[in-house]
């Protein structure tokens, strides 16, 4: 259930996001119309910039407006202009935003290319954007999926498309409430002689093997990203009790004040060359990820490993970029639509606040 407190902030924010998405899609098409005569490379660069501006708005909101603290552990962010593969655990829709924030911090805004399930292709507005942003959609049919990955990566490599290719090897979200997922995952692990996990699902390795077989010369490194929402998912109220994973409503409602992010870098040249070796490497990474999550799930989270640094405020440059991006989307010709939706949102906000007051 979504609480009134969460709805008070989520309703206007959701309307704002949707209105910006409409603007984004119109701009996406406009960029093609204006830049197409100058070549595909020009179109791609301008769309990447447009995508980065869109991401900056979310980054500013999630990092500064919500006053959420981000604790970073492990290796530093990738160097500028490096093509990398991102492997991340998946708990909720907020994961996507945090990965975009990482790319912005590394100066790779607009370079995120996702490997995702086929159904997301048909998601209103975003499906169109992701499809034309070199997204790779999988039907979870081994042979066909392998060909899709190979074809798209070959195109990107030939065209020199800068990329942070992101994939979620678990194949679905980890939800502590749905114990059948973890039970099924551990049953599979036991049948195949694999280690059982407590805070993650056994990763599917075929997609990663395919990415590395095609993109070994294209990518510089593989980053294993582990995300822990303090108070959600793998811990509740710092007690280590398993709870509901966060969602956009609870996150925007201020329910999560701290996020812990661990980065582990492996240069491609240090990865095994064969598929069996890649499979073993990925499984070993997930064992280590599970151990790290377990450390954060103890009774006193202050005893967990110390972070490299803590971030909760964007740089002055980030603030400027975010504000310019926000104003750009607001005052584009679809501005009247945006302000109309915002008016509806604030009216709904007032009604919810009145309802909250009268309920006591």
Image: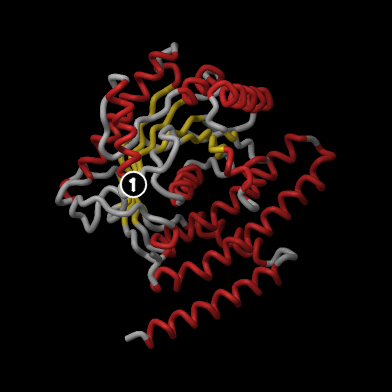
Work out whether residue 90 can be spotted. yes
Work out whether residue 71 can be spotted. no
Give the residue at the far top of this rendering.
274
Where residue 293 appears, x then y in whole percent?
Answer: 26, 41
In the depicted structure, whether residue 78 falls above or below residue 31: above
Give the residue at the far right of this rendering.
37
- Residue beneath the point at 21% across and 55% down: 238
Where residue 50 appears, x then y in whole percent?
Answer: 65, 49
- Residue beneath the point at 54% across and 58% down: 57
In the depicted structure, whether residue 236 falls above or below residue 33: below
Where residue 95 appears, x then y in whole percent?
Answer: 43, 47
Q: Quadrant of the image for the N terminus?
A: bottom left
Q: Nearer the viewer, residue 38 or 117?
A: 117
Tell me the crowding category of disc 1: few under 14, some 14 to 19, or many 20 or more residues within 10 angstroms, Cα based: few
Task: Give the image quarter of residue 266.
Answer: top left
Q: Nearer the viewer, residue 223 or 341?
A: 341
- Residue beneath the point at 37% across and 65% down: 254
Q: Quadrant of the image for the C terminus?
A: bottom left
Give the residue at the far bottom of this rendering.
358
Task: Give the image quarter of residue 173.
Answer: top left
Tell me how the rendering is colored: secondary structure
- Residue behind mark 1: 178
- Residue beneath the point at 58% across and 38% down: 118
Q: Nearer the viewer, residue 106 or 290?
A: 290
In what element is the residue under mark 1?
A: loop
Instruction: Give the side of residue 157 with respect to residue 115, left or right.
Output: right
């Amino acid at each position: 259930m979504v609480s009134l407190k969460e709805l008070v902030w989520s309703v206007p924010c959701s309307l704002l996001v949707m209105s910006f998405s409409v603007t984004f899609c119109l701009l996406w098409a406009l960029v093609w119309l204006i830049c197409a005569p100058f070549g595909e490379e020009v179109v791609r660069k301008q769309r990447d910039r447009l995508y980065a501006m869109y991401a900056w708005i979310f980054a500013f909101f999630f990092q500064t407006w919500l006053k959420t603290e981000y604790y970073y552990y492990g290796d530093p962010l990738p160097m500028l202009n490096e093509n990398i593969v991102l492997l991340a655990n998946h708990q909720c829709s907020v994961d996507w935003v945090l990965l975009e924030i990482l790319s912005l911090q590394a100066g790779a805004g607009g370079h995120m290319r996702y490997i995702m399930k086929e159904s997301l292709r048909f998601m209103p507005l975003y499906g169109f954007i992701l499809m034309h942003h070199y997204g790779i959609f999988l039907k979870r049919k081994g042979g066909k999926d392998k060909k899709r990955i190979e074809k798209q990566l070959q195109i990107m490599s030939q065209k020199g498309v800068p990329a942070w290719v992101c994939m979620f090897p678990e194949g679905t979200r980890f939800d502590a409430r749905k114990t059948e997922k973890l039970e099924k995952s551990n049953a599979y692990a036991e049948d195949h002689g694999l280690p059982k996990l407590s805070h993650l699902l056994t990763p599917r390795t075929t997609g990663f093997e395919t990415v590395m077989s095609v993109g070994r010369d294209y990518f510089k490194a593989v980053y294993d990203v582990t995300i822990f929402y303090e108070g959600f998912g793998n811990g509740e109220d710092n007690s280590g009790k398993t709870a509901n994973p966060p969602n956009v409503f609870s996150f925007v409602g201020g329910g999560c004040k701290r996020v812990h992010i661990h980065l582990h870098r492996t240069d491609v040249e240090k990865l095994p060359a064969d598929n069996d070796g890649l499979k073993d490497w990925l499984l070993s990474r997930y064992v280590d990820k599970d151990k790290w999550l377990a450390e954060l799930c103890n009774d006193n989270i202050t005893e967990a490993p110390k972070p490299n640094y803590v971030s909760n405020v964007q740089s002055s440059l980030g603030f400027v970029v975010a504000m310019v991006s926000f104003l750009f989307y607001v005052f584009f010709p679809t501005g009247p639509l945006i302000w109309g939706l915002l008016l509806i949102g604030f009216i709904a906000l007032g009604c919810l606040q009145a309802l909250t007051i009268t309920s006591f």
